[in-house]
Image: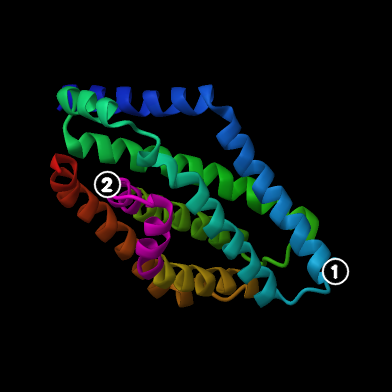
């Protein structure tokens, strides 16, 4: 058990080091978020208080969705076949997929929080229940990271991986995105938190199912 935890920590450290050496990827994501927010502001001429909460919320999650796709698409695509074979001799497939999921969750959480700060500063902040909205951001980060990491692993085995990833991720991400929009809308309206427990439970169940499927299915994908 201790050896598995140590290997998992080493794999996550490798992900952080690769990201730090290729800081243009993270900087590109931050630039994408800022650019998308500015474009939304200019397109809708959205001065504070003039944008309806439902449009404000939907635009934010659309930005988060495309940010997640761009940030996580490189999870396996950037790995060369020789490097993957080397990893196979060092750690189990479960540790590899889990390390990438955990790293992408942390990356998405940072991008989501920074994106929300920039978005709220430029477009205004109509959220009444900030605690529930932050919980929704956390659940969304876990869902996007786990789903897109698995899809990235599948797409990396085929040609035109970027196109394949977009096609495969759509039926997985769409139900999750709709639930996140509904849950965050409850936070914006300031509804009683008891009315949102069903949505929280559904999103948690989706996140747990995707992580479990990644744990079970990735070894077969890895051997191919």
Q: Quadrant of residue 222?
A: top left
Where does the magenta region start and end?
150-172
Q: Main secondary structure of the magenta part?
A: helix
Instruction: State if disc 1 and disc 2 touch (CB < 8 Å).
Output: no
Q: Is residue 140 above or below residue 101?
A: below
> Residue at coordinates 49% horizontally, 68% vertically from top-left?
180
Q: Which mark is residue 157?
A: 2
Answer whether residue 58 is visible to the viewer in this image. yes
Residue 71 position in % (x across, y down)? 50, 45
Residue 186 position in % (x across, y down)? 56, 74
> Residue at coordinates 18% horizontally, 47% vertically from top-left?
221
Q: Nearer the viewer, residue 27 or 186?
A: 27
- Taking the image as shown, residue 100 lies to the left or right of residue 47, namely left
Q: Quadrant of residue 66?
A: bottom right
- Taking the image as shown, residue 62 lies to the left or right of residue 101, namely right
- Taking the image as shown, residue 83 lies to the left or right of residue 179, namely left
Q: Is residue 224 above or below residue 133?
A: above
Describe the element under mark 1 as helix, strand or loop.
loop
Disc with the residue nearer the chain's start (2 vs 1):
1
Residue 33 position in % (x across, y down)? 66, 50
Answer whether residue 124 is visible to the viewer in this image. no
Residue lying farthest front?
Answer: 159
> Residue at coordinates 47% horizontally, 73% vertically from top-left?
178
Q: Nearer the viewer, residue 70 or 210?
A: 70
Q: Quadrant of the N terminus?
A: top left
For label 1, the residue is 45
Q: Residues within 10 Å of mark 1 (few under 14, many from 20)?
A: few
């Amino acid at each position: 058990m201790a050896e598995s935890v140590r290997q998992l920590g080493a794999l996550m450290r490798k992900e952080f080091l690769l990201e730090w050496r290729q800081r243009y990827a993270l900087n590109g994501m931050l630039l994408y978020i800022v650019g998308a927010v500015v474009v939304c502001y200019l397109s809708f001429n959205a001065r504070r208080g003039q944008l309806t909460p439902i449009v404000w919320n939907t635009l934010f999650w659309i930005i988060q969705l495309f940010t997640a796709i761009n940030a996580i698409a490189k999870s396996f695509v950037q790995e060369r076949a020789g490097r993957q074979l080397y990893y196979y001799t060092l750690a189990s497939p479960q540790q590899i997929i889990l390390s990438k999921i955990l790293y992408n969750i942390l990356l998405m959480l940072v991008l989501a929080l920074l994106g929300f700060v920039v978005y709220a500063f430029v477009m205004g902040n109509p959220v009444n229940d900030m605690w529930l909205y932050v919980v929704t951001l956390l659940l969304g980060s876990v869902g996007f990271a786990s789903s897109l990491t698995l899809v990235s692993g599948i797409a990396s085995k085929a040609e035109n991986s970027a196109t394949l990833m977009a096609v495969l991720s759509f039926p997985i991400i769409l139900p999750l995105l709709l639930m996140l929009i509904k849950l965050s809308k409850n936070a914006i309206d300031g509804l009683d938190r008891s009315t949102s427990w069903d949505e929280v439970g559904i999103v948690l169940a989706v996140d747990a199912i995707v992580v479990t499927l990644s744990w079970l299915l990735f070894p077969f994908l890895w051997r191919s």
